[in-house]
Amino acid sequence: MANKITIIGAGQVGSTVAYALTLRQLASEIVIIDIIKEKAMGEAMDIRQATPFVGPISVRDGDYEDAKGSDIVIFTSGVGRKPGQSRLDLTQTNVDITKSVIPLVTKACPNALYVIVANPVDILTYQFVKTSGIPANRIFGTGTLLDTARFRARIAETYKVGATNVHGYVFGEHGDSSFVPWSLANIGSIPVDNFAKSFTGEKLPDFDKNDVEDYIRKSGGIIIGAKKFTNYGIAATTADLVEALNFHTDSVLTISSMMNGEYGIKDVCLSIPTLVGCNGIKGHIAAPLTDDEVEKLRHSAECLKDVIKQVNF
């Protein structure tokens, strides 16, 4: 696969993303850039020494000049969340870091697809769209992809079915105002609400929708409280998104991107099902939501807009 990926940031997330991409052979060349050059060098060297067990992939550290010709740029740079801190608490600090990076990386990679991973991902995606000069269809955040994976994993655990049989999404902010549109959720084409009573075998357990959504929202904080950072789930999420970007067949993913009037929402980045592929975003999919679900999505948009008003981009 002849494609080049640059990763901005060699912290826990950036380095694990680089490793995940390497293991899945999703690039022929990976460049890791970090303000702490020795850290980028060490991570690249460590991963490069694993490539004999994987395949012919070049993994190296570099500077923005080395990013030239990248097909995909993955932005992970920023301060990580501390225990008890919300993603939005990081906002101005990480906006300032992003502000310093955007002109450097976009000059080197004007034609790349940009994947924003750093938090708060919806705000930083919005910043990239508004200030980078890169077309909006080539900028997207990982959004609620990880939240959606957590949702599917939780339902799969409850019913002891394969997570690939669980279909549904988390919409809105990657954060406290996210929600599950339960009207769209199903297991093997059976609505989640009807699955237990449709099963003719042993009695299946009940579950509480609020508990499931609480689990989704709090998972990141629990992991950070236990190990000080999250890296594996978001790295696998980013690798999955990169894989989708490598194909001409488009995928439906809940990435964070600029809303253009869908559900009456404009001028904010958040997650709804979006058709995306090797040329970037083709468009959003305005799934049929209930009135209550539409209100929850609009509430999530307003929460993000309130933060945007307080930030100096």
Image (spheres, grey):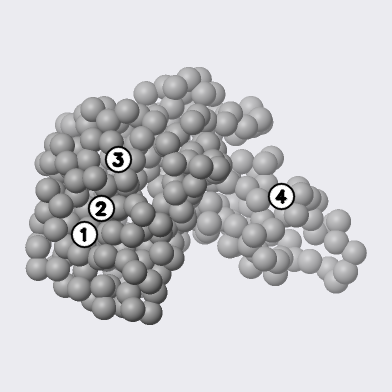
Verify CB contact (< 8 Å) between mark 4 and mark 3: no
Q: Quadrant of the C terminus?
A: top left
Q: CA distance from mark 4 to mark 3?
A: 36 Å
Looking at the image, can residue 306 be seen?
no
Q: Secondary structure at mark 3?
A: loop
Q: Quadrant of the N terminus?
A: bottom left
Q: Earlier in the sequence, mark 2 or mark 4?
A: 2
Q: Position of residue 17 (x, y in %)?
A: 34, 62
Q: Residue at x 57, y 55 (%)?
A: 151
Q: Earlier in the sequence, mark 3 or mark 2?
A: 2
Q: Earlier in the sequence, mark 4 or mark 1?
A: 1
Residue that lies at the very extreme toward the right in this rendered image: 200
Residue at mark 3: 112
Q: Residue at x 53, y 56 (%)?
A: 149
Q: CA distance from mark 4 to mark 1?
A: 39 Å
Q: CA distance from mark 2 to mark 1?
A: 6 Å
Residue at mark 1: 32
Verify CB contact (< 8 Å) between mark 2 and mark 1: yes
Label 2 is placed on what type of residue? Thr
Which quadrant of the figure has residue 123? top left
- The residue nearer to you, when weighing 285 against 122, is 285
Verify CB contact (< 8 Å) between mark 3 and mark 2: yes
- The residue nearer to you, when weighing 66 against 285, is 66
Q: Position of residue 163 (x, y in %)?
A: 63, 62
Q: Residues within 10 Å of mark 3 (few under 14, many from 20)?
A: many
Q: Earlier in the sequence, mark 4 or mark 3?
A: 3
Q: Residue at x 22, y 53 (%)?
A: 8
